[in-house]
Amino acid sequence: MARNILLLFILLPLFASSQYRKIRYKYEVTGGIGVANFLGDLGGANREGTHLLKDFEFKATRPSLSAGIRYKTSPFYAFKGMITFGMVSGNDNLTEDKYRNNRNLSFRSPVLELSAQAEFYFLREKSGKLYKISGVKGKKNKKTTAYILGGIGLFYSNPSAINPVDGKRYKLRKMHTEGQGLPGGPKQYSNFNFCLPVGIGMKYVIDKRWSVGAEFAFRKTFTDYIDDVSGVYYDNSAIQQAYGASAAQMADPSLGKIPGATLPNSDGTGAQRGETKYKDSYMFFELTVGYKFTKKRRTRSKF
């Protein structure tokens, strides 16, 4: 027994070293394919407009792709840089809420995102048996890892929609649909905005280099114009005079099922077009694959 204990203490430094060898493959190329969905003013569930996942509409789901590189600093922490592309959309035709359905607005937009993310592994990978001593058990092999993530990103979006009159697709930012640039209208919005990714993921380790997994991440943004809708209706005749008939049609393509729904209120303020209280958000769910590699060591010349 004493002999086994002595061997165990001799091997302990090797066990510790092996923990660092497990992250010898600190670098990992990762990629994913999946779906994107949008949470904002347009479309949504069959209810009065609400917030976040309570307004989720599955039919608005569109494809997404991602690629990046991960750097693992310890068995518990990693950092990664990602580029993610997806399409997001919303359509009032998809909801049975009578007010949004009558509004009849829709959009489609690409989302191209660059992000820096940190990962915390609350379930970490463990290698198989590292030693074999009589009466002493080695570690079991754990190939499934799970983590939570958070970060910051910069994304590009450019909403467009089909004009119900001529059937052509127009870039909505150029249409100034809420009177951007006109007296009393809102400030023109940007195609570039910041987001905060937050999510959870898991990986299954195939071998020391390859892994597969799944990841879900929600993006909080600081813009209300991914879908080109935020505030109130602007005077449609003024939009037509300033920006043309197509702009006026895109600003108010309502179905007329609710008379006066898009006309100014009794106090002269514009009728509600969107909800300014909450910013837009979007999310990605992807199946991922990763390949680990090591940096080549420099070899010193021998003299």
Image (cartoon, grey):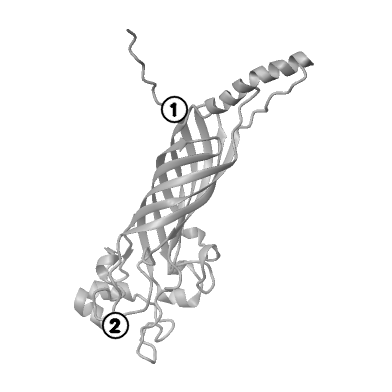
Q: Vertical placement of 116 versus 7: above or below?
A: below
* Of 90 and 199, the residue lying toward us: 199
Q: Is residue 75 left or right of residue 86?
A: right
Q: Where's the C terminus, which quadrant?
A: top left
Given the current orientation, which residue lies at the most extreme bottom position?
A: 266
Disc 2 versus disc 1: nearer the observer: 1
Amino acid type of the residue that numbered disc 2 sits on in the rendered structure:
Asp
Secondary element under disc 2, as helix, strand or loop, is loop
Amino acid type of the residue that numbered disc 1 sits on in the rendered structure:
Phe
Given the current orientation, which residue lies at the most extreme right position?
A: 1
Q: Write down the residue under mark 1.
A: 293
Q: Residue at x 64, y 18 (%)?
A: 11
Q: Vertical placement of 104 versus 212: above or below?
A: below
| Residue 300 rendering spot, x and y as whole percentages | 35, 15
Q: Residues within 10 Å of mark 1 (few under 14, many from 20)?
A: some
Q: Is residue 111 visible?
A: no
Q: Vertical placement of 249 versus 265: above or below?
A: above
The quadrant where residue 43 appears: bottom left
Q: Write down the residue under mark 2.
A: 235
| Residue 87 rendering spot, x and y as whole percentages | 39, 54
Q: Is residue 222 visible?
A: yes
| Residue 290 rendering spot, x and y as whole percentages | 47, 34
* Of 217 and 122, the residue lying toward us: 122
Q: Residue at x 20, y 79 (%)?
A: 241
* Of 75 and 224, the residue lying toward us: 75
Q: Residues within 10 Å of mark 2 (few under 14, many from 20)?
A: many
* Of 170 and 282, the residue lying toward us: 282
| Residue 291 rendering spot, x and y as whole percentages | 46, 31
Q: Earlier in the sequence, mark 2 or mark 1?
A: 2
Q: Vertical placement of 171 versus 255: above or below?
A: above
